[in-house]
Amino acid sequence: LKKLAAESPDLLRRGNETPLQKAASKGWTNVVVYLLDLGFSPDDTSNYNRSAALHRAAARGDLALARLLLDRGADVNAL
């Protein structure tokens, strides 16, 4: 999976959400960190409701994950 994520991240996309959006919506902090380290953008809003990973973390009330995303460059105004 790590090799696939590093070489072809688009193959990990499921439906209309990126792997980073999915990980943030589930609260999988270690996966979020890994995907950010691979170069996934925290501001990617290419899904049906245009929500970024930060929006997903905020929606679940995960302050620690929201802070992590902000520390890693997430834009609070990304839409």
Image (tube, grey):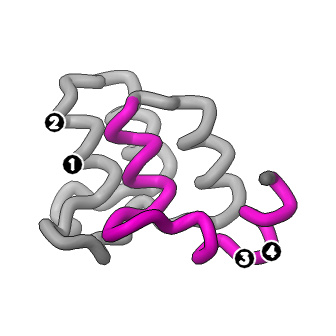
Q: Secondary structure at mark 4?
A: helix
Q: Residues within 10 Å of mark 1 (few under 14, many from 20)?
A: many
Q: Which circle's residue, 1 or 3, is located before the other in the chain?
A: 3
Q: Residues within 10 Å of mark 4 (few under 14, many from 20)?
A: few
Amino acid type of the residue that numbered disc 3 sits on in the rendered structure: Ser
| Residue 25 figure quarter | top left
Q: Which callout, 1 or 3, points to the residue nearer the camera?
A: 3
- Residue under numbered circle 2: 59
Q: Main secondary structure of the magenta part?
A: helix
Q: Which callout, 3 or 2, points to the residue nearer the camera?
A: 3
Is residue 79 depicted above or below 65 in this figure? Answer: below
Is residue 5 depicted above or below 56 in this figure? Answer: below
* Residue 36 x %, y %: 60, 54
- Residue under numbered circle 1: 55
- Residue under numbered circle 3: 8
Is residue 12 depicted above or below 54 in this figure? Answer: below
The magenta stretch is 2-26
Amino acid type of the residue that numbered disc 2 sits on in the rendered structure: Ala
Q: Secondary structure at mark 3?
A: loop
Q: Which mark is residue 24?
A: none
The CA span between labels 3 and 4 is 4 Å
